[in-house]
Image (cartoon, coloured by chain):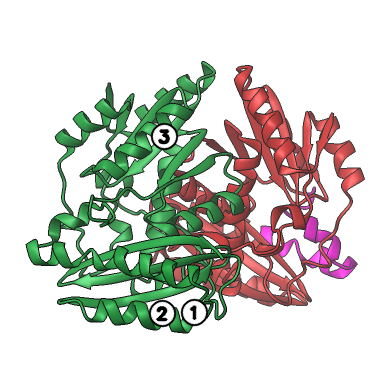
Chain colours: A green, B red
Amino acid sequence: MKIIETIDKMQTEAEKIRLSGRRIGLVPTMGFLHEGHLSLIRNARESSDTVITSIFVNPTQFGPGEDYEDYPRDPERDIRMAEAAGSDIIFHPSAKEMYPEGYQTFVTVEKLTKVLCGLSRPQHFRGVTTVVIKLFNATKPHLAIFGQKDAQQALVIRRMVNDLNLDIEIKISPIIREPDGLAMSSRNTYLDATQRKNATVLYRSLILARQLIESGERSARRISDELVKIIAQTDGAEIDYVSMVDTAKLEPVQTLSGEILIAEAVRFGKTRLIDNIILTV
Amino acid sequence: MKIIETIDKMQTEAEKIRLSGRRIGLVPTMGFLHEGHLSLIRNARESSDTVITSIFVNPTQFGPGEDYEDYPRDPERDIRMAEAAGSDIIFHPSAKEMYPEGYQTFVTVEKLTKVLCGLSRPQHFRGVTTVVIKLFNATKPHLAIFGQKDAQQALVIRRMVNDLNLDIEIKISPIIREPDGLAMSSRNTYLDATQRKNATVLYRSLILARQLIESGERSARRISDELVKIIAQTDGAEIDYVSMVDTAKLEPVQTLSGEILIAEAVRFGKTRLIDNIILTV
């Protein structure tokens, strides 16, 4: 497996691969890989000839006071895991390589980023879209794979790809969960034992929403009230948002019909967890 | 010569050309071609195997009340001229093809766009960088050529290309002038006979600046005062700006040294003209 640390070398390698007629699949990650990332790499392995995994903790998507410095990092372990899952190349640039002095260009998706996570993390998606287009330009993929865990991110990236005419297929892979239902996340390592146990309330509340809908409930407010109730009853849980929105524009729905994204963000201490399900009503 | 009107077809064609090992040169234009554009096309002809000329009057780079509706258009004449100058493909999308309903993604270069033309046209460069990246993604060039007439635009695009890691060589071609020195521009057609005659003051003032510098003057303020004087004395001329800035950050210089951009924007009636020279002091 190749490990590439500069954009120049990555582009030269990617151009060579493209000219040989091989299909490049990219899995962009912030490292500290877990089973969720590995499922993306396996997915890329099946749908492309050369799999590139990028490992880069992107400073521009963290707000002031967020966990950029504390974000868990273990590139050596990541490299072993990515190789075992079928990655051919690791692209692992430094922050200085990605954002040299004088850097000043940003990509903004205007509407989809103003809701849900965009409310409590106002510059977050600007950082995401900017780094993603940089990673695309560095690795020149035919296909890129993102996780459904970050549902809003997936929609924002699809929108950017369409709007800016990037000739790249975007695939979204399902959420991978721990045996007790907690969505896998590098940030789960922040949780202490009690928080870890209580954090299952995110998935339990989503299952409750599904049950309510299956039993005929169509009022977003009534379902939302139930979800808020069981989360608020959980020790240490502080709700950022619980939202029911359409999957095209992420606008709140009152009466559920069509494809609905139920998304939530809940803090346990300083750890902010997100989870979601998409249901067709 | 091929005329392509959709992004999909353009990408398919561009990918085929790239896979055949040929080098694509792109000349982005807003049409109504003049000798300045043709020099860009000839320049692309010399440095690439396949020359694509794009013709697109880009709505997002015009502000409210500016001349988007009135901007001169003659695609049939443009196509004949571009072909004669050596273009192999014309990419001529509609506004709806480029900005379909729901469009919401923009690329912003933050600092370089806040000065010079950015002051009187605050959203202009956001429109330029956005459309340029869209044209790049549609035509997949190895090389793109822009005119020195739009000096700030050239710097902003270079900055975007570097910052976003676009693997595209950017070439800047010299200003092409009418016999009396007026920089060629599609907007010159707006001028009546008197305005057209008086518009030569832009170039004359730049020549004066060069003479002052050659005779030893180094004070930006004193040179600027002289330029403002001869422009202000000209019937119908209204100064937007006369600036002396460094060519890296476009920051004003007090005492001239190194590479200096002298740039000006002057209105004649509703027509806004720009011109510039770069001097090494």
Left or right: B16 as drawn, with respect to A51: right
Residue B249 in view, yes or no:
no
Q: Name the residue under label 2.
A: A224
Q: How far apart are marks 1 and 2 (CA)?
A: 6 Å
Report if residue B201 lies within the magenta region.
yes
Residue A43 disc label: 3
Left or right: A191 as drawn, with respect to A244: left
- Label 1 chain ID: A
Crowding around mark 1 (Cα neighbors within 10 Å: few <14, some 14 to 19, many 20+) is: some
Q: Name the residue under label 1.
A: A220
- Label 3 chain ID: A
Amino acid type assigned to the residue bearing label 2 in the image: Ser
Mark nearer the viewer, 3 or 2 = 2
- The residue that appears at 19% across and 29% down in the rendered structure is A80
* Residue A15 in picture, x, y percent from top left: 48, 24
**Are the residues under marks 3 and 2 on the same chain?**
yes
Q: What stretch is highlighted in magenta?
A: B178-203
Amino acid type assigned to the residue bearing label 1 in the image: Ala
Q: How far apart are marks 1 and 3 (CA)?
A: 34 Å
Q: Between B196 and B97, which is closer to the camera in this rendering?
A: B97
- The residue that appears at 67% across and 23% down in the rendered structure is B17
Element type at mark 1:
helix
Report if residue A248 lies within the magenta region.
no
